[in-house]
Amino acid sequence: MVEYYKSVVFENYANFSGRARRSEYWYFVLAHALIISILGIVCAISFSISESLGYILIGLLVVYVLAIIVPSLAVIVRRLHDIGKSGVYFFVRFIPFVGGIWLLILLFTEGNNGRNMYGEDPKEIFDEIDEIGEETGY
């Protein structure tokens, strides 16, 4: 999970091209949710200790949320690319009532096998690396 989070946030910060596996996207979402939850709890506790400390930690939480917007959008676009959809499908979420559900279904959909118009299948690349590791013992 940590490797996927680091990959999204540090290596592919603003990379809107290519493809992202379901595991890359969902592990990033899980790590992001854990970080937000932990920071929220720490902020709540700090407010009970000192109001000024609470405001400082809320400020850090806001900075984190703002800093993570671009990598979040990038990984969503790459995830949509993995199922052969354009990144414009992200805007489906703004359709009242059904848009969010439709986008969620798209994000859960298994990616296209093999190469598509957005690049090589990241699952195949990962499997090839695993096979090389098994052959060499690493």
Image: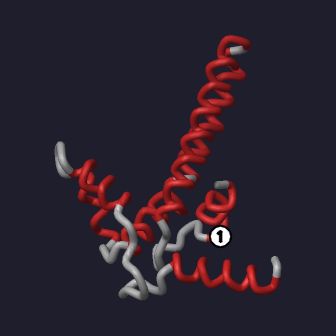
- Under circle 1, the secondary element is helix
Which quadrant of the view contains residue 33? Answer: top right
Which residue is drawn at the image coordinates 62% and 20% (left, top)? 44
Q: Looking at the picture, how far across and down is residue 71, in whole percent?
A: 53, 61
Question: Quick check: can you spot residue 70?
Answer: no
Camera-side residue of 64 and 113: 113
Which quadrant of the view contains residue 54? Answer: top right
Q: Quadrant of the C terminus?
A: bottom right
Q: Tell me: 87 left or right of 130.
A: left
* Position above or below: 90 against 127: above
Q: Tell me: 82 left or right of 126.
A: left
Question: Quick check: can you spot residue 45?
Answer: yes
* Position above or below: 40 against 2: above
Q: Quadrant of the N terminus?
A: bottom right
* Residue type highlighted by circle 1: Glu
Camera-side residue of 40 and 100: 100
* Position above or below: 53 against 62: above
Residue linked to disc 1: 11
Which residue is drawn at the image coordinates 62% and 35% (left, top)? 59
